[in-house]
Amino acid sequence: MAEMAKNRIVSRIPGFDGLSPVDLGKISKMAILRSFRKGEAIFEEGQEATGFYVVVKGRVKIFKMSPEGKEAILHICKPGDHFGQVAVYSGKRFPASAETLATSEILFLPREKFLQLLTSEPSLALDMLSVLSARLRELTAQVESLALKEVPGRLAGYLLYLSEKQGGIERVTLGSSKSQLAGILGTTPETLSRILTDLASRGFLRNGRREIIIQDLQAVERLAEMGRLKS
């Protein structure tokens, strides 16, 4: 890939945007663009973290597997999202696995070269810390939801989160299949389907194939806060 084109990609990535042309050039020079087929593993839990990744095109799921073989989706990464950074900074192994959900292009940034750049560019380190802090807040909310809320409350909270990310709109684009959404919420596709039907019958929402329309925002907000449906 031409360096100018790679510079444009890097400049649009959160945490890298706003950097000087010189710093963008340094990152572009070390970055390696890789292509993956749908369903291809990028790394597996326990694998040595030799670098971190940024989605340029496509989607990637970050997940863990239970001893019983049940998949729990921690995050679905879209273009511009970073993943794998925590293990890179700590010098440890990846705590989860990553797999593409579509044909994808991924930037790989080698650990040693990137850490050398961070030591010489404190402003970049602060930008990356901001990205990691946002991810930590998201994961904390997800763990809290899984531990304290029933599935309808988790779904309501997740829909409000997506709505906020998409500009506070009522027509929420999921960006993932219902099966993947079930994995994020820690439930089964069958249970999620029943809950969506129930909430639609109550007038809370209208269920589409790849989107959900929030019809009663106050009811959805109450459900997210309470964590369960009233009987």
Image (cartoon, helix red, strand yellow):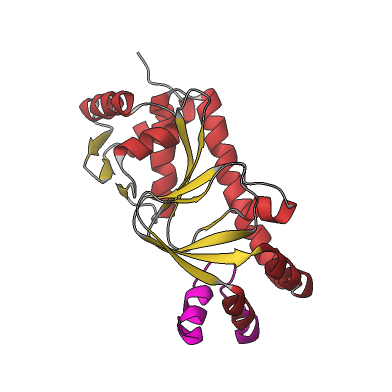
Q: Is residue 14 above or below residue 154?
A: below
Q: Would you say 206 lies left or right of 20 here?
A: left
Residue located farthest toward the right when viewing the structure as drawn: 119
Q: Would you say 198 lies left or right of 27 here?
A: left
Res. 222 visible in picture: no
Q: Would you say 82 lies left or right of 227 here?
A: right
Given residues 217 and 56, the one toward you in this image is: 56
Task: Name the spot of residue 10 as percent of width and height, x first.
Answer: 52, 74
Task: Name the spot of residue 9 as percent of width and height, x first.
Answer: 47, 75
Res. 90 visible in picture: yes
Membership of 105 in magenta stretch: no
Residue at image location 44% in from the left, 48% down from the top? 99
Task: Name the spot of residue 87 as percent of width and height, x first.
Answer: 67, 50
Q: Tell me the quarter of the image containing the C terminus.
A: top left
Membership of 4 in magenta stretch: yes
Residue at image location 21% in from the left, 41% down from the top? 208
Q: What stretch is highlighted in magenta?
A: 1-23
Looking at the image, how many numbered discs can be counted on the residues?
Answer: 0
Given residues 37 and 23, the one toward you in this image is: 37
Residue located farthest toward the top when viewing the structure as drawn: 231
| Res. 230 image quadrant | top left
Q: Is residue 196 above or below residue 50?
A: above
Q: Is residue 67 above or below residue 135?
A: above
Task: Name the spot of residue 64 as percent of width and height, x first.
Answer: 52, 36
Q: Tell me the quarter of the image containing the N terminus.
A: bottom left
Q: Would you say 198 lies left or right of 46 here?
A: left
| Res. 108 image quadrant | bottom right
Residue at image location 70% in from the left, 65% down from the top? 126
